Image: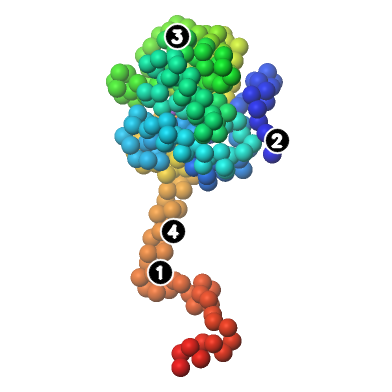
Amino acid sequence: RKKVTIDTIRKLYKDNTPITVMTAYDYPSGMFCEKSNMDMTLVGDSLAMVALGYPSTNPITLDEMIHHSKAVARGSKAPFLVGDMPFGTYESNINDAVNNSIKFMKEGNVEAVKLEGGVEMFDTVSKITSVGVPVLGHIGLTPQRAAALGGFKAQGRTAIKLLEDAKALEEAGCFAIVLECVPETVATFITQQIGIPTIGIGAGNQCSGQVLVQLDILGVYDKLSPKFSKVYANVGNDITNALKTFGQEVRDRSFPKSGDHTFKMQKGEDEEFLK
Ligand code: KIV
Ligand code: NA
């Protein structure tokens, strides 16, 4: 596969070709993004919930994200690789935000970072992009702020506020913006009003691209099933059934099957050994 760069993303946007983005959190999930021709692979901090079992995205650290993104990068080669800056690594001061984003790139092998927030992140995003780290914005439902927003729910913020946020992020140099849980009409309007791609999740099909969480669409994660997600496969059931069958076959000694899954000594040795 040909390497997807920021120029490829710009070209897709210019040609009005929807941009495909999928999350990944380790080597095999990264490899699936590679094999399925994703344009972008996102090491989202949703992995804190879906892959690590935390109740929110907030407990994960930058070093943990780096540990995961390195594994994803080994499987996902061609897609443009983006990593989520975790909660607490970019909000309090700009220098930390810049240093942490550079660390993420250098140690985690990501090609861009994503961070949550709109107008209030203008200076931070401007600085990060100015030193050469591409930034993917994220507005609407921003899960890292779930506590302040009153939970994981569609946002009652006004369309005007969201448009201001999107415009600020564009001006600050973001190469694209994730719109999460934004009413369809608002997402469509924002997409028309700005000059960079919007990547929707629960934001209707008029965005410039779409992203979903891999373990959600595979039917593996069993805690939340967001309205905006779609279950494309029931891998969770397949895994449970496979493990059940293994357990059963071990208990009734039908696995391993002699000859199929076993090794033989060299000719004559068996008899010799058993003497
Ligand atoms: O963490 C994540 O997976 C995300 C995407 C859903 C946009 O932020
Ligand atoms: Na995220």
Task: Return the disc, 3 or 2, that comes first in the chain's sequence.
Answer: 2
Name the mark on residue 242: 4
Q: Name the residue under label 3.
A: 119
Mark 2 or mark 1, which is nearer the start of the sequence? Answer: 2
Residue carrying label 2 = 2
Q: Give the CA distance from mark 3 to mark 2.
A: 35 Å
Which amino acid, by three-letter code, is at mark 4? Ala
Q: Is residue 122 left or right of residue 78?
A: left
Q: Where is residue 82 in the image (x, y as percent from the top left)?
A: 54, 29
- N-term mark: 4 or 2: 2
Q: Check disc 1 and give the amino acid type.
A: Glu
Tag 3: residue type?
Answer: Val
Counting residues from the start of the chain, the first of labels 1 and 4 encountered is: 4
User: Do the residues bearing badges 1 and 4 touch, measured as CB atoms within 8 Å?
Assistant: no
* x then y, percent, for residue 228: 44, 29
Mark 1: few, some, or many residues within 10 Å (few <14, many ≥20)? some
Coordinates of residue 15 in the picture (x, y in percent): 69, 21
Q: In which quarter of the image is the N terminus?
A: top right
- Asked whether residue 173 is in view, the answer is yes
Q: Name the kind of residue labelled 2 in the image.
A: Lys
Asked if marks 1 and 2 touch (Cβ < 8 Å), the reply is no
- Per the rendering, the mark at residue 249 is 1
Quarter residue 134 falls in: top right
Colour mapping used in the image:
rainbow
